[in-house]
Amino acid sequence: MKLDSLQKLYIEELRDLYNAENQLVKALPKMAKGASHQELKQAFEDHLDQTKEHVERLEEIFKRLDEKPTGKTCKGMKGLIEEGAEMLEEDGDEAVLDAALIGAAQRVEHYEIAAYGTVRTFANMLGEEEAVELLQRTLDEEGETDKLLTELAETVVNVEAPAGSR
């Protein structure tokens, strides 16, 4: 596709996000299974349900645009998920591995926050008011997930991880 308008860029970025969210739908159950702390497992399971809603919202936006959501691979998300998968294969202290999973998950959240902020701005500039509302709702949820992960890291997981020595 030739990117010669903001509308085309908006659709391409939405397709990228759609693929990213679908990759996450597959990755989150593995992260939940790999987490040791029950609170972290639950956070991943809850975010899976939320991610499925994000996919549905994107599908609604595509339907309103009369466009197909498929046709693009989000290489950024693919890389972030691969890095997280590496943590699942490591051997070590459970709390340390959970801390690593939180770090991987927060990198994903920050990537999504940036991407959703971008497409929300495009939607706003293009007068897509319903899309702006849906994208903002998702953006807010991604921010809440990031805050929850920080809270889990600071109050539970990282506190229990052995600090080690130099």
Image (cartoon, grey):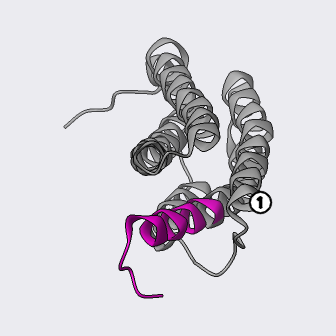
User: 128 and 95: which one is in front?
Assistant: 128
Residue range in magenta is 1-18
The residue drawn where x is 61% and y is 43% is: 131
Task: Examine the residues drawn in magenta and state their main secondary structure.
Answer: helix
**Residue 89, horizontal then vertical, whole percent:** 60, 61
Q: Is residue 88 above or below residue 114?
A: below
Residue 11 on the magenta span? yes
80 left or right of 20 in image: left
Mark 1 crowdedness (10 Å alpha carbons): few <14, some 14-19, many ≥20: few
Hey, what amino acid is under mark 1?
Lys
67 in relation to 135, above or below = below
| Res 6 quadrant in image | bottom left
In the displayed orientation, state which residue is furthest to the bottom.
1
Q: Closest to the observer: 23 or 134?
A: 134
Q: Name the side, left or right, on which 77 lies relative to 47.
A: left
The structure residue drawn at horizontal position 56% and vertical position 37%, both measured from the top left corner, is: 98
| Along the line of sight, the residue nearer the viewer: 75 or 12 | 12
Residue 66 at x, y percent in the picture: 73, 67
Give the residue drawn at x 73%, y 56%.
64
In the image, 13: left or right of 46? left
Could you tell me residue 96's position as x and y percent? 49, 37
Residue 72: horizontal and vertical position, in percent?
A: 58, 78
- Assign the C terminus to one quadrant of the image: top left
Q: Quadrant of residue 165?
A: top left
Q: Secondary structure at mark 1?
A: helix
> Is 155 left, or right, of 62 in this rendering?
left
Residue where numbered disc 1 is placed? 63
**Residue sticking out furthest to the top:** 155
